[in-house]
Image: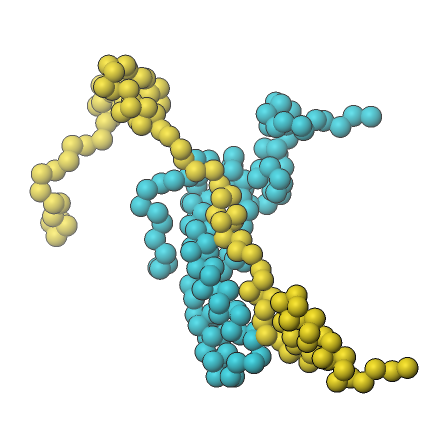
Chain colours: A yellow, B cyan
Amino acid sequence: MSVPRARMLELVKAQCQLFSTTFNPEGVRTGNKILRQRLKGPALAAYYPRKIITIRDFQKEFAPLDLMIDDEVEDDRLEHIAALKARGKGAPKKKNSAPDFKKK
Amino acid sequence: MSLFQRAKKFDLGCFANIKTIRDHTKRKAFEAAEPERQALRYIIRNTTLPARTRAIAQLQLTQMHCYTRPTQIKNRCILGGKGKGILRDFKMSRYNFRLQALEGNLPGVKKASW
């Protein structure tokens, strides 16, 4: 015993109303699958770990309490520069005026 | 010259070279543009809309900056910035993964032996 198609469509329509789904008997492409997708931007943007705190932040935080914190990397850098300067190999001093390129 | 400027304040906490910084910028650009891209993709895929609207949406999507495309994003090693041989679960290249695993820095990872 076969059921007429119109009757079946009515049934499907009622079903869609009941469960609040989209009634689309022809299977027309409405692009709803794009709307159903979740946004993946936040997950992708969280790939690399972010910088949370630096030694300079620590120093600032503890400065009012008169606590000194050594920044070893910065100390090493300053020491290296001091050694260069002592040998006369340091960076030249900045000129007060902009360099004149036309002079040759 | 790229339209996208890098963040004013450096915000990477891992190994950084220009490639990782660029990739990070792309990730943030994609995150910002994702709703717009999805809206355009919806218009393009929706066959009930007029053809002209859909064609305009196609043009707009192709004319968005390349940094907003998800295919531009590449997983890179957080310890060395390498782009190939990355284990997704650990975000590390295979050699850095081996070094870290042998050192015991990765919980639950153990050298196989049977």
Q: Is residue B66 visible?
A: no
Give the percent coordinates (x, y) of residue B1: 35, 59
Name which residue lies at 57% across and 65% down: A34
Q: Quadrant of the N terminus of chain A?
A: bottom right
Give the percent coordinates (x, y) of residue A52: 40, 33
Left or right: residue B5 versus residue B49 is left
Give the percent coordinates (x, y) of residue A33: 60, 66
Left or right: residue A5 versus residue B69 is right
> For residue A6, what is the image quadrant?
bottom right
Q: Nearer the viewer, residue A92 or B25?
A: B25
Left or right: residue B22 versus residue B92 is left
Left or right: residue B61 versus residue A71 is right
Does residue A98 sit above or below A20 in this rendering?
above
Q: Nearer the viewer, residue B53 or B109?
A: B53
Q: How many numbered discs, if any? A: 0
> For residue A59, what is the image quadrant?
top left
Name which residue lies at 52% across and 49% down: A44
Name which residue lies at 42% across and 56% down: B32
Does residue A26 sit above or below B24 in this rendering?
below
Does residue B71 sit above or below A92 in this rendering?
below
Does residue A27 sit above or below B99 in this rendering?
below
